[in-house]
Each structure stands twice: as C-alpha cells, then as structure tokens.
Amino acid sequence: MIDFKHFISKENKLWRLENLYFIINKDGQKVNFKLNRAQRHFYDNYLKDNPFHRHIILKSRQLGFTTFIILYILDEIIFSPNKEGLAIAHTKLDASEIFNRKVRYALRNLPSEIEEILEIDQSRAGRVQFAFPDQSVSALSVANSGRSASNHFLHISEFAKLCKTYPERAREVITGTIPSLSFDSFAFIESTAEGQGGEFHEMFMSSWKKRDRITPTSSKVEWLPHFYNWTWDDQEMSKITDNIPLDKMDECEIDWKEYKEENGLTDQQITYYYLRWLQLNKDVDKLHQEYPTNVFEAFIGSGSNYFSSRKTAEFFDKCDNNYKRYDFINGEFIEDNTGPLYIYEEPLPGKKYVIGGDVAEGIMDKDNSTAVVLGYDKAIKAIYQGTIEPDEYSKMINALGRRYNSALLAVEFNKDGNWVNTDLQINGYPNIYQRTSVDDITKQVSKSFGWLTTKKSRDHALGEAKKHFNSTDSINCRPLLEEISTFVRNKRGKPEAMSGKHDDLVMAWCIGIAILQGKQDQKVEAKIPTWADLVFNA
C-alpha cells in the first residue's frame, strides 16, 4: 500500500506529477505525464522552491500549459485537505473537454491505493470532491464562468479568447473571481494572443513592462508575466527531419531569410515555422497569433512587423525613462509631467541637430502632430507627440528648433505641412530643409521648402530608418518604440500602422534619419524669404 503521508511532503511534488498521472498525448496515446522543457522551466524557476503566486502566461500553441496547470492544481487538491480549486475555460465545450479529458482521465488512472484512502465524489457535473480520513474536504471545479467563492487555486485557460468573445464574463472574472483570491492563493492565466486590446493584452503588457521588479512576495497581488514561444516545442520540432531551403519557400509578408537571421533561428526552426504557415493556409496573422516568436509579434493583430520585433523588444528593455516632459503654452515650454514634449537630452553648445516633423489636423482622437529631434549621432534628443492645431504646431516647432541651436527643420510638406513650412519662412526661421527637383524637359533645378512625401521618398526614408534600426544598439524612446511595435507590412506589402494604431512619430523619425544618412538632397541654409520667394514656392 502507498504511504499517503510520504506523498503529501512538498519534496515529492515533481515525482507525483510524473508518476501518478496519465494523459492522452498529441499522438493519441495513453502515457505517464512528463514535464516538457517549457513546463519544466516554468516549474523549476517559478513554482518549486520560492514560488510566485500569480502568473499570466502568453504562449504558443501546443506547449501543454493547460494540461500541466490542471494536473498541478489537481495534485494540490488531492494532497492538501480543505482546499478549493477552480478552472475556467472560455466555452462550455472547452470546460467539458478539460474536465473529462484531463481531470477525470487522470483520476480514472490513479493508483488504486490512493482511491482506498480518499473518497472521490464525481456526482456533480464539472466538479470533483475529495473526502479525507479526517473528514476534511477538498474540491476542484471546471466551468466556463467565474465565481466569487474563495478559491485557493485558480486557472483561467485561453483568457484572451474569453475577453474577446464574452467580455461580460471576462469582466465577471476580473471583478469577482480574481479579487476573491487570498494572498496565499495561486492563480494561473494562460492564453494565446487575440490581437491588441482587451483585458488579457492590457494585463499582460502592464506586467511585462515591470516584470523584473516582481518578487515572490509582491506576486501575491501582482501578476508575473511569462512568454513561451514555439521554439520550446521540442516534440514537434523533432519531427522535422528534412529542412526546406529558404529559396524554395513561397513568398509572403515575411521575408523568410531576413526573419531567420533577425531571430537567430536554425534551418530546422525556420522550416518548422514555414510549415506552420502552410498549415494555417498561409495566413500570417494567424501564424503570429498562434505561433508567436516574441511578445510584440503575438499581439500584432494583422500584417508582419516592418522593423524587427525581436530588436524592438530588446530596445524596450533598455529604455531608462530618463527624460523630462513639457507642454507648450503661450510660446514657452513649461515643465509638465503629462506634457506632449519629451526631452531626453538638452542641446549642447556647438552641436547640430535635425528635426523631422509630421503635421496632423489637430482633431482629437485622430493622428498626432509629431516632431523628433535627432543629433548627428542619430540618437533621439527629444520628441513631440500631441494633438495640436497646425498654427500652434508651427509656433511650437519654431521654438523647439531654436532651442536646439537652430536645428535643421524638415517638416513634411504634404497637406497642412505646406502651410506650416510657409509660416516658418514668414516668421524667419533660419534653417529649413529644402528639397531639389529637376524639370524633366527644361532640366531647370528648383528648390522648395519642406519634405515632400511621395511613394519614392517614403520608401527611401523607411529603408534608411530600417538600416539604422538594424545597426544601432538602442533606441531610448518608449513612445517611438510603441509605434514601431505596431508598424507592419499589410497584405499588399505596404508598411503602415496596423489598424487602430498610429505611425506619425515613426514617419517624423524616418524623415530625420533619412536626412542624416545623407541619402537625400543636401540641405541648403534658408534665408528669410521675400514676397517673391513665397509666390514662387507656393
């Protein structure tokens, strides 16, 4: 007979998980549950010795976290009297599937000696109850909605899908179930992504930004974020025996060679990833959602990142948030910790600067008017990002340029930018970017103020910015990186902000970088224009 007390000891948790419980594996076989590499990493680092209490897990498909967490909690319930566990799935069908194929299956195959000690009651749908010899009781329930009763263990599976499909039930979990947890409770939220927006995205990203500061003690109330991508799937990866050459892969929004190099993938891994894309009917959006390579890619929603999402994530981690914020009021910059101007480095005497600018209409909830101040080292010194009328923007960027040693102003000429460039000339700004054009017939050269965005100049600026992005070690500007993380190639291959996001700061930065890279026409110092100049350039 099994010594029940022997198994209750904490040291035997891993042994119990890998010896007492049976599962049906990916190939439909009955096998003893064994932790895979991702599960073992999670267990050893966050649950074993000095456990964290609240976990939010963003994951690729088929890593088995639902199975692992269910068995982890089931084991705690079986060997810990007077404990209550709850598992929430996003649909009734999934809840039934988890209960029958994971909980009941494991119980049905327990050693008979345990069943002789515990009285197991499965008479209620979606709930199993254990009565101990001392008359104490523990139970595990699996449902598709939250309950406000106190739970010692909570597991929420595919929470992003619950948030997207059933927002009211998701809100019930957030406002009712989670707040009922005690400090000593353990909670696990795990899900693949469902695009940006929604409670799962907000909860995960807010935790991800401060993940290095979360301790076992603070995790009693804070969520510790985890990310496990598809490269952890050793079992499926091992089935790739013949690699597909990169030049034999079908074209799509993803440049397979570039993607392999950017993410440091092996030939086997890029073949696996390519086959997953084929399996998903060549749907890149679905590929990113179900098999993300990094955190930002998981939430991208549509398209494929134009800038390396791996490097974007690295740059985010390096941001030191060492800046001061200002607002522009009555012609002056006034320090304001919520202002639209971020200054990372004040101007240095004798140094030259370039400012790329993108003008919007100044309508709330629409595009922002932006400006990016760059040193000749291409590092960001300041940014402006706010909703402002074009006439006020002209005053602001005039003052910002003068603050940075009469920086070269390269404001986009299109739409309201025409008016802004003209206003800068009228008000005597001494250093405005000029573009050169040559008449195809007369070959006459003319110069005009402002950056004119055409398909050719846009592609050029984006290309130069990408070169810089790939070669630099850091970009210490979180607002710009946030736009970069959602700047994608759409279905037609055009780089742009994904639906519902902005790229105004990206474009202002690209203009500045393109000029500094020296690939555009060389700047010409502007003089205070005459009336004839304004008529000629209009």
Image (cartoon, rainbow, N blue to C red):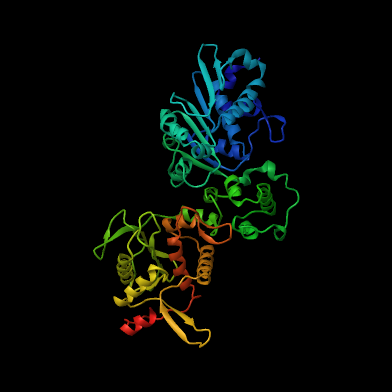
Image label count: 0
Foreground pick, 312 / 484: 484
Task: Give how far across and how far down residue 257 sits, in percent.
Answer: 65, 60
Q: Residue at x 43, y 26 (%)?
A: 148
Foreground pick, 176 / 390: 390
Foreground pick, 113 / 339: 339
Q: Residue at x 41, y 74 (%)?
A: 450
Q: Is residue 61 above or below residue 3?
A: below
Does residue 454 show up?
yes
Q: Is residue 504 above or below residue 16?
A: below
Q: Residue at x 59, y 20 (%)?
A: 6
Q: Quadrant of the C terminus?
A: bottom left
Does residue 183 show up?
no
- Which residue reaches farthest right? 242
Q: Quadrant of residue 383?
A: bottom left
User: Going by the image, does 176 lie left or right of 144?
Assistant: left
Q: Quadrant of residue 344?
A: bottom left
Q: Quadrant of the N terminus?
A: top right
Q: Residue at x 51, y 25 (%)?
A: 85
Q: Is residue 81 above or below residue 362?
A: above
- Which residue reaches farthest left? 330
User: Going by the image, does 247 lie left or right of 330?
Assistant: right
Task: Give how far across and how far down residue 411 sits, in percent.
Answer: 40, 70
Task: Give how far across and how far down residue 36 sits, in percent.
Answer: 64, 37
Task: Give how far across and how far down residue 305 sits, in percent.
Answer: 55, 56
